[in-house]
Amino acid sequence: MGVVFEPRFKYCRGIVTKLIAVITVIDDVYDVYGTMSELELFTDAVDRWDIKAMNQLPDYMKICFLVVFNFVNEMTYEILKEKDYDVGMNLKNSWVRLLQAYMMEAKWFHSGQKPTLEEYMKNARTTIAGPIVAVHSYLAAANPVIEKELECLETNPADVIYWLFMVFRLQDDLGTSSDEIKRGDVPKAIQCYMHETGASEEVSREHINEMNRQLWKRVNAYIRAETPLSETTIEMMLNLVRMSHCIYLHGADRHGIEEFESKDLPHSLLFEPIPL
């Protein structure tokens, strides 16, 4: 609902819901459960996109591989049938880019390397999963698919898309719990800035908030100018990032910590009347 709410985008909403569920599981595999050798095998299997490559994986990873493989193939079939456009390689490559970025984070964690804020952000704008959600949601919603728009979302992102993914990343990092880092996640933007500059957590948090404010100023200025992206596409990407402000409101992680009122929000939106 947060990305596209209009009735005609029913299929897109279903795809994004499934996608986020799958990404959440795969993210935990890279952050917590997989050894480096297992993660390398899994990344290679997805890159090769060969069902036989699954044989070298441990059982729990075989399930993960099949989920990704079947999800992409099913979506490819549906779009080819409805729009006469083959999106298989676009979807597969978006997964490869995400998993390669996850691998970089895993290498940092297992080696004890602490990246600079710039190094971290260069990789983290992909690990936030904004790019893969953008590609999947666009292909699910667009009819017809416009090659130039698709290029702006994947291999050659427009400035506004790049900035929006950065905002998404920073919002997530501001809400990342200390428990998440302790269990195996890499240091986030705040910790990278603290390590690089020696600043306190409070000062570092304010620095990240200021980065966010400046990025939004760029976004707001850009969307008033001419852009190769359609108004519908830009609105979808804006909504994706607006949603992150809701999920990580006031530094809370409503995605990773189930005790928060996340479950109450959809119920309130869909079933409770707006008081007049």
Image (cartoon, rainbow, N blue to C red):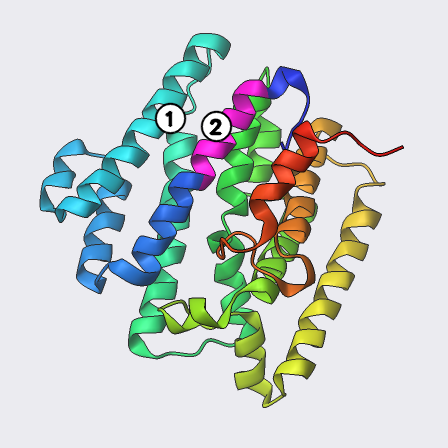
Residue 43 spot, x, y in % from top left: 27, 49
Instruction: Give the residue pinned by disc 2.
Output: 15
Q: Position of residue 132 (x, y in %)?
A: 48, 41
Q: Residue at x 21, y 46 (%)?
A: 61
Task: Name the residue: 50% across, 68% down.
Answer: 120
Classify mark 2: residues with Cα within 10 Å, few (<14), some (14-19) or many (20+).
some
Which amino acid type corresponds to the residue marked 1 in the rendered image?
Answer: Gly
Mark-to-mark CA distance, 2 and 1: 15 Å
Question: Which residue type carries mark 2?
Answer: Ile
CB contact under 8 Å: marks 2 and 1: no
* Residue 226 picture location, percent across and down: 81, 36
Residue at image point 29% right, 34% down: 67
Majority secondary structure of magenta residues: helix
The magenta stretch is 10-20
Q: Is residue 115 left or right of residue 167?
A: left
Q: Which mark is residue 162?
A: none
Q: Dot 1 corresponds to which residue? A: 88
Q: Residues within 10 Å of mark 1 (few under 14, many from 20)?
A: some
Of residue 158 and residue 176, the one placed in the foreground of this image is 176
Mark 1: secondary structure: helix
Horizontal side of 124 relative to 78 (left or right) equals right
Relative placement, left or right, of 170 versus 213 is left
